[in-house]
Image: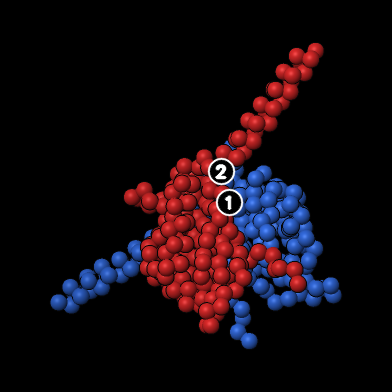
Chain colours: A blue, B red
Amino acid sequence: MHRNRVRLFVAALSIIFFNSVSFAETPKADPARASIEKLGTAFADAFNRGDIAAIAAMYSDDAVVLPPDSDLVQGRSAIEALWKSTRDSGMRDLAFTILEVHSSRDLAVEVGKADFKMQTADQAESPSQTVKYVVVWKRQKDGTWKLFRDIWNSMPSAPK
Amino acid sequence: MHRNRVRLFVAALSIIFFNSVSFAETPKADPARASIEKLGTAFADAFNRGDIAAIAAMYSDDAVVLPPDSDLVQGRSAIEALWKSTRDSGMRDLAFTILEVHSSRDLAVEVGKADFKMQTADQAESPSQTVKYVVVWKRQKDGTWKLFRDIWNSMPSAPK
């Protein structure tokens, strides 16, 4: 009886462990995820060193960005101007946390959170702010992934 | 000489016409577009008659909605509660304008605008408000498309 309970316990543990592993591994399994993780890091690095041309080059020719409180921003030169103006307004220390990637042939959807600080004219920095986003990536003819549609919005306001 | 000019003019017109047609036709050409247009109409109709269960059923089991000023809303029952609370808060006359649909096998991205009014307790209605959105649809095993990721944000504030 005791041995049976132990076996049952081990079996239950195995099921829990198997499910945890498969849950944890599933998001990693997407074939586009590794590329998109690298591109996210490259995007944040380029933004943080002020290389806005490098950011613009990560978008497809026909990309559309949908910032809050704005109309749609279409095409690479308009997108470059958007990110230049965002950096000029003081955004610093941009970092992405990818929550998930799902791809199907030439489209991939990434959901994540972006953290950043806003620097004021006297070089002071705001506390870290967070937005959540959905990026749809499109695989180009040369096999590389480019940002195709890019939209974000605010998290809940901090309690006052 | 005159005849050559006419030929050149006709050739130029043909090129312009061909390009106009292909530009105008491209968005319609996506194989998922007709289905997604019907689903958009069904979503708005269900919302406007208060059938929130029908809306929840249009999302995939593993859907995520990302409303502004909110954390991620995951899963069909949380999404149903979100739309119920949105309608209870007075949203009326919801209508979608699809700007584009691009699909690749089992994922499709739709970009559009949503118009709606907010009804106050005394039955007065606000002027029409507009948000822009990105919906990623996922084709299910039975071939139907379901909302998989759904995010929106505000248009520019009206001039004061």
- Check the image and report above or below for B152 versus B35: below
Q: Which mark is residue B99?
A: 1
Quadrant location of the C terminus of chain B in the rendered image: bottom right
Q: x, y (%) of residue B87?
A: 48, 73
Residue for point 66% across, 56% down: A72
Q: x, y (%) of residue B82?
A: 47, 72
Closer to us: B156 or A78: B156
Quadrant location of the N terminus of chain B in the rendered image: top right
- Check the image and report above or below for A60 versus B154: above
The kind of secondary structure element at disc 1 is strand
Name the amino acid type tagged 2.
Answer: Pro
How many other residues sit within 10 Å of disc 2, few (<14), some (14-19) or many (≥20)? some
Q: Which mark is residue A125?
A: none
Residue for point 76% across, 74% down: A125
Residue ranking furthest to the right: A122
Q: x, y (%) of residue B111?
A: 57, 54
- Are the residues at dot 1 and dot 2 in contact (C-beta closer than 8 Å)? yes
Q: x, y (%) of residue B42?
A: 43, 58
Residue for point 69% across, 65% down: B156
Does residue B154 appear to the left or right of B136 in the view shown?
right
Q: Which residue is mark 2?
A: B27
Closer to us: A54 or A15: A54
| Label 1 vs 2, first from the N-terminus | 2
Q: Chain of mark 2?
A: B
Answer yes or no: is residue A31 visible.
no
